[in-house]
Image (tube, rainbow, N blue to C red):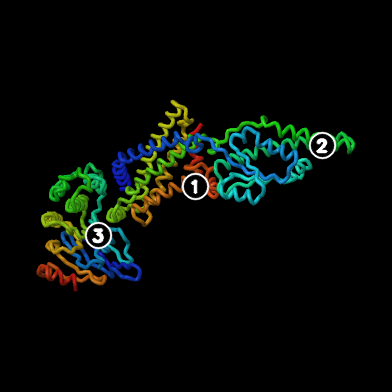
Amino acid sequence: MFAKLIISDFKRIRQLMIPFAILFAALLLIMITLVRNADKLVYQNKSETVNIGIIMQADSEYSNSAYNMISNMDSYKSICNFIDIESRDEGMELLDNGSVNALIIVPDNIVSSIMDGTNTPVEVIYPEDGSLQTFILNELFVSTSSLLGTSQAAIYSVLSLCRELDISENDFQQASAAINNLFLNHVLSRTDLFKSETLNVTGSYTVIEHYTAALIFLLLSLCSIMFMSFFRSHNQAVVNLLKANGINRFQTALSQFLSVWSVLYLFYLVIYILLGTVSKLHGFFSVSINIKGLVLGILLSAMIAITAAIVSRLPVSLAGCSLLLFLLILMTAYTGGLIVPELLLPKIFKNICPYTPGNTILRFICECIYQ
Amino acid sequence: MFIIKNISKSYGSKSILSDISFEVKSGICIGLLGINGSGKSTLLNILAGCIKPDSGNYYFDGEGKLSYLPQENPLMDDLTALDNMKLWYKGSSRNMMSDKNKLIFSQLGVESFLKKKVKTLSGGMKKRLSLAIALMNEPDILLLDEPLSALDMLCKQGIIICLQGFLADGGSIIIATHETAALDICHKIYSLKGGTLHLVYDIKNGDKKLTEEEFCRILLS
């Protein structure tokens, strides 16, 4: 009887293939268009300068050098517009109203503290909800501070050498001043030493690769909403009669699941082979057809089919279940960084993103389909 | 013979069936009368194996097969009539179109819409198809829950004739009904009230057939 039920469910789902294929193709077309333009959507073509407020609490020769160094660096010059601010209160107000994207508070003893090793930190304040600009600024600050850290390490190395050579205290002080001058002047003016790094909000994958992986998940998940009616189609008489014939609710659900799983996997194969072919012909991304990718499809289709089957059994109407599944998919995709990349998510979602099912799925898809 | 012994069923503190016992001999049709919620469908569901009784048992004296036609048609709307038959047929689908079954399908007039999707069929067609499915497995006893409800006279007549043929071949029927038309084929009629059975008609005792008035009085009493 169970085998007959499976055959019947396959016959039933076969009838949904044509509308499913139409929906699949329509969504595929929309998503491919979005994916191809993902670069523009995320980064945009026009470049906007980022306003950074600087509060210099002391006006010394070295502080000005540090300021000039940063403001003259190519990497900063292209995107940053530095604004001198008088006080911390004024800076916080500008930060709150969005006039500046970050606030740098340089302490009055910044240079002397570097020289004597006290290392009074420079305070950098970002707004509550980070953006792409915030992320880029943070990367720039990290690379700048690492350069200063390196030069500081070099100063200490030379001073340590002087100590070992057992030179007089007077000579040591002169050497220390000379080295500090030499290194600080040298480092702070050597802006061309900065290595150019390509920053990518989607991590080690390109934006197109990121959204292609997201497309696979979203496409199959959204199409699974169509199967809600399939999961809920048995009336009570059918359920009772199946039970009378030794088929319990779990077996009924299993039979339906197998049908939906098969269809989802079939369509996964279509899109996987399509992406692999496009990858070979045009090289937008590097999707490779391999065993990992094929196994991924089995797991992904199973997971989506199980989720749809569970949601369809909730004691609400068909429309309610479909809406719930739709919202669940959107929430999984958003919190997982599939719609907006992880680094551009609001702070609260950014913190939880790596631990969400959506992000795990995304990373798994990327690992399996890309070379 | 099909024997039902001391079947009881409660939902929470509410007793639905209390110590129900009766026997169904070969070629006999038992009618169950009762208002909505009196427990007729529950009793048939128990006998079909869909739900478990709290106590009591039921069995064939010897070997026997049972078919159940629930009140709602047990059909999958998005399959054809033939596919539904294949699903419920206990045996290889190749043997489904035996001469005996062909005769049943012909009597019920289902041959004409075998390839049509169930969702395109009328209520009468669906009921005839459901009955054909119940009969095609050659049961010894047929459990029918309101088989004539919401059908036109012609359709009812066709079903009654088919059931009479089944009884004539030695089959037994337990039928829960509100329809006086179904009483014509009953050899015994029980009224189900307060969870207990009361015999209201037995052809063996020489009782007169129930009139519509008496039927209504039993239902309302």
Q: Residue furthest bottom?
A: B221
| Residue labelled with disc 3 | B60
Q: How far apart are the alpha carbons under marks 2 and 1?
A: 53 Å
Task: Please identify, in this view, whether the residue under mark 1 or under mark 3 is nearer the observer.
Answer: 1
For this view, does A266 lie left or right of residue B143? Answer: right
Q: Nearer the viewer, residue A120 or A353?
A: A120
Q: Secondary structure at mark 1?
A: helix
Q: How far apart are the alpha carbons under marks 1 and 3?
A: 60 Å
Instruction: Identify the amino acid type marked 3.
Output: Phe
| Residue labelled with disc 1 | A335
Which quadrant of the structure image shows residue A185? top right
Note whether residue B138 is visible: no
Residue B49 drawn at (x, y percent): 29, 58
Q: How far apart are the alpha carbons under marks 3 and 2?
A: 109 Å
Task: Please identify, in this view, whether the residue under mark 3 or under mark 2 is nearer the observer.
Answer: 2
| Residue plotted at (40% across, 40% down) | A219
Q: Nearer the viewer, residue A47 or B185?
A: A47
Instruction: Identify the amino acid type marked 2.
Output: Ala
Q: In terms of sequence position, does the residue under pointer 2 or pointer 1 come before the other?
A: 2
For this view, does A251 lie left or right of residue B93? Answer: right
Which quadrant of the structure image shows residue A58? top right
| Residue labelled with disc 2 | A177
Which quadrant of the structure image shows residue A36? top left
Above or below residue A128? Residue A75 is above
Q: Secondary structure at mark 3?
A: strand
Q: What chain letter is assigned to the residue under label 2?
A: A
Q: Nearer the viewer, residue B190 or B193?
A: B193
